[in-house]
Amino acid sequence: MNQVQFLSLLLALSVALNIAITAGLLAYRSGASMPNALLTGAGAAASSLGVYFAALAAYK
């Protein structure tokens, strides 16, 4: 793994974490319980990473 690939992976993880926190807080502030808000955030992070890895696989 070269430096560009490593930094690209770190950027994807950072974006996924930001999406997860935003989705979780939005769900919690909308009235969802804490476990449901955490699951919503985790689902959003997994979806965003799935899209990233699918695009990466299609590119290669």
Image: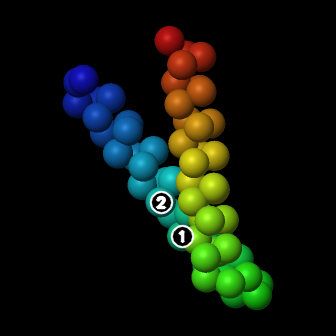
| Vertical position of residue 9 compared to residue 33: above or below | above
- Mark 1 is surrounded, within 10 Å at the Cα level, by few (under 14), some (14 to 19) or many (20 or more) other residues, namely some
Quadrant of the image occupied by residue 41: bottom right
Residues at circles 2 and 1 in contact by the CB criterion of under 8 Å:
yes
- Work out which quarter of the rendered image holds the N terminus and state it: top left
Quadrant of the image occupied by residue 55: top right
- Relative horizontal placement of residue 38, taking residue 27 as reference (left or right): left
| Vertical position of residue 30 compared to residue 6: above or below | below
Q: Residue at x 23, y 24 (%)?
A: 2
Amino acid of disc 2 = Leu
Amino acid of disc 1 = Ile
User: Is residue 26 among the parts visible in the rendering?
Assistant: no
Measuring from the top left, give residue 60's x and y in whole percent: 50, 12
| Vertical position of residue 60 compared to residue 12: above or below | above
| Vertical position of residue 10 compared to residue 53: above or below | below
SS at mark 2? helix
The answer for how far apart the CA atoms under marks 2 and 1 are is 6 Å
Viewer-side residue, 27 vs 56: 27
Q: Residue at x 47, y 60 (%)?
A: 17
**Mark 2 highlights which residue?**
17
Residue reaching furthest to the top: 60
Viewer-side residue, 8 vs 38: 38
- Mark 2 is surrounded, within 10 Å at the Cα level, by few (under 14), some (14 to 19) or many (20 or more) other residues, namely some
Measuring from the top left, give residue 6's x and y in whole percent: 29, 34
Q: Residue at x 38, y 37 (%)?
A: 8
Residue reaching furthest to the front: 35
User: Is residue 21 among the parts visible in the rendering?
Assistant: yes
Quadrant of the image occupied by residue 5: top left
SS at mark 1? helix
Measuring from the top left, give residue 35's x and y in whole percent: 61, 76
- Relative horizontal placement of residue 32, taking residue 52 as reference (left or right): right
**Mark 1 highlights which residue?**
21
